[in-house]
């Protein structure tokens, strides 16, 4: 059956309940991705609609008439925001997305509510939520038992099985609200430990999505825990995590970056007491005497930053080299939120020196992602006021990806000479440069524009056609005017004479020069 976007829309109307808060959020997220134009490489075939959706990481989405057959490469089971984004993008080509959403909001969900209700006997059979006084050891035993019997030989179903095990654990979380995020954090942490050892023993390198999913779960739990005062009953659990989390930096793994990020999340959001961080710093300092691995060094730098040991952190960053740029966004985000901003500027200045070398090692997509992430943590307006030279240094290090920001900055600073040099570096054709900016420079210091017009003349003549010769003559007239204003007509005569001599075989160009009255008929 040919793919029918209207049929898909009807199926989504039935599957999503407008009275369900989770479904409401799902629709909102899908609309946001669609409206931000993050759906790309869309293709429609006889049986499906496929596309990529740019979220935190890009995902691949396939829509079929049957929603059960549709799928997405993200870790979410069932309908996800990426599938909705692709649906809205496709539906907008033939219908009104706004009207579809309004129709969905009017749906009568009584049938879905009845279908979702459980019998009393089902409720009696449900497991009683875990108690909050189990203790760390009992929690750890439960996590270990949950993963027992899992088939580790079939890599193709292993990831799904591991996610299901984790979800089962979450369903049995403590009933008291303040214990739920702690249990979720523990479940994510221990699941990563268990699954990492499975991946290492079976040489599995395809579980990145699973580890990213666990990071999202941990991040969600930590954000709740970080804004509430921890009860005394949490002490035993927090002590275990503080002592055990060295695993994230030393355990053999194929997922180094994910484990490092988990360590950073714990120490940034949860373990905020100064004494805890100083003890961790001492532990890592002692470990580094024998272990100079990448993760241990990154962990040491991170804890040094949290402790305020900037000299130690910056020294290690200098030693580490260009690869440190990958981890910089997390640190710059943290430092940008601190007052005063002097520390932030110091780290930006040090890290930006590694950007050119780092960008050379990445593909085009990863370069763009890094640049976007890096500048999200920099208030360019504030930096332009407080430390414009540092901002210019960053722009220069990240060229050509920062051309537009750098160009606007130089013009606002009235650094017209540098602005002209940037246009030459980028190779922007004169006809595509903002006419208003050229007029502004012409009023202030017209001689600065001479290199641009010289380049434009050379480029136009090199195209070897009548229209380009006409453009060249137009630019030559502009040049003559500038030479005249600057009282440099002797230089103009010499330049034009040499140009005509160099182009003596280009009869059509000479004819245009005569028509433009640059030379006598």
Image: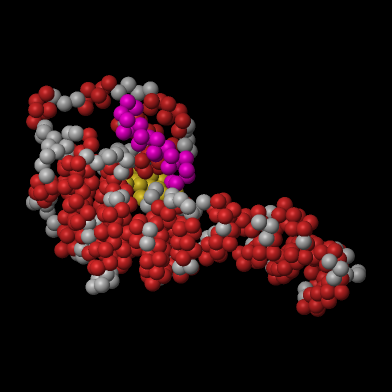
Looking at the rendering, in which quadrant would you find the C terminus? Answer: bottom right
Q: Name the residue at 61% across, 64% down.
A: 426
Nearer to us in this view, 468 or 490? 490
Q: Is residue 73 visible?
A: no
Q: Is residue 506 above or below residue 200?
A: below
Q: Is residue 324 above or below residue 9?
A: below
Q: Is residue 327 above or below residue 160?
A: below
Q: Name the residue at 41% across, 60% down.
A: 328
Looking at the rendering, in which quadrant would you find the N terminus? Answer: top left
Give the side of residue 423 with respect to residue 349, left or right: right
Nearer to us in this view, 228 or 170? 228
> Residue 122, how many percent across, how many down?
11, 28
Q: Name the residue at 31% across, 50% down.
A: 272
Q: How many marks?
A: 0
Give the side of residue 504 with respect to residue 389, left or right: right
Magenta stretch: helix, strand or loop mostly: helix
Q: What is the span of residues highlighted in magenta in the rendered image?
A: 17-39
> Residue 339, how many percent across, how many down?
46, 51
């Amino acid at each position: 059956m040919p793919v029918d976007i209207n049929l898909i829309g009807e199926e989504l109307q039935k599957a999503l309940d407008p009275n369900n808060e989770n479904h409401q959020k799902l629709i909102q997220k899908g609309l946001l991705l669609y409206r931000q134009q993050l759906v790309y490489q869309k293709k429609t075939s006889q049986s499906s609609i496929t596309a990529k959706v740019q979220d935190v990481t890009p995902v691949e989405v396939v829509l079929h008439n049957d929603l059960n057959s549709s799928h997405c490469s993200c870790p979410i089971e069932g309908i996800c925001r990426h599938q909705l984004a692709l649906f809205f993008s496709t539906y907008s080509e033939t219908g009104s997305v706004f009207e579809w959403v309004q129709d969905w909001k009017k749906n009568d969900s009584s049938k879905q509510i009845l279908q979702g209700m459980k019998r009393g006997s089902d409720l009696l059979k449900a497991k009683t939520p875990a108690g909050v006084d189990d203790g760390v050891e009992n929690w750890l035993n439960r996590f270990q038992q949950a993963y027992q019997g899992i088939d580790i030989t079939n890599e193709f179903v292993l990831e799904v099985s591991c996610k299901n095990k984790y979800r089962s654990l979450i369903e049995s979380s403590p009933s008291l609200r303040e214990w739920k995020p702690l249990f979720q954090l523990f479940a994510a942490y221990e699941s990563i430990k268990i699954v990492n050892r499975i991946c290492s023993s079976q040489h599995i390198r395809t579980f990145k999505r699973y580890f990213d999913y666990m990071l999202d779960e941990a991040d969600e739990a930590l954000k709740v825990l970080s804004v509430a005062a921890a009860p005394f009953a949490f002490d035993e659990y927090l002590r275990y995590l503080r002592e055990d989390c060295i695993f994230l930096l030393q355990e053999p793994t194929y997922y180094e970056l994910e484990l490092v990020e988990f360590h950073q999340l714990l120490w940034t959001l949860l373990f905020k007491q100064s004494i805890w961080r100083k003890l961790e710093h001492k532990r890592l300092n002692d470990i580094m005497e024998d272990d100079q691995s990448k993760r241990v060094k990154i962990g040491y730098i991170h804890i040094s930053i949290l402790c305020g040991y900037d000299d130690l952190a910056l020294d290690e960053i200098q030693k580490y080299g260009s690869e440190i740029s990958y981890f910089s966004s997390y640190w710059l985000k943290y430092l940008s939120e601190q007052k005063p901003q002097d520390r932030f500027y110091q780290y930006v200045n040090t890290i930006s020196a590694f950007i050119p070398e780092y960008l050379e090692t990445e593909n085009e997509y990863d370069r763009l992602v890094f640049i976007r992430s890096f500048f999200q943590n920099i208030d360019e307006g504030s930096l332009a006021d407080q430390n414009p030279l540092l901002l210019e240094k960053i722009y220069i290090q990240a060229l050509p990806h920062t051309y537009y920001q750098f160009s606007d900055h130089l013009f606002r600073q009235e650094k017209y000479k540098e602005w002209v040099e940037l246009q030459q570096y980028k190779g922007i054709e004169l006809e595509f440069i903002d006419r208003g900016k050229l007029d502004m420079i012409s009023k202030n210091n017209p001689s600065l524009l001479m290199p641009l017009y010289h380049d434009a003349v050379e480029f136009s003549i090199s195209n070897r056609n009548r229209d380009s010769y006409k453009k060249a003559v137009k630019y030559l007239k502009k040049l003559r005017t500038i030479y005249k204003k600057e009282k440099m007509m002797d230089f103009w005569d010499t330049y034009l004479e040499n140009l005509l001599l160099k182009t003596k075989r280009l009869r059509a160009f000479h004819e245009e020069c005569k028509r433009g009255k640059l030379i006598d008929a």
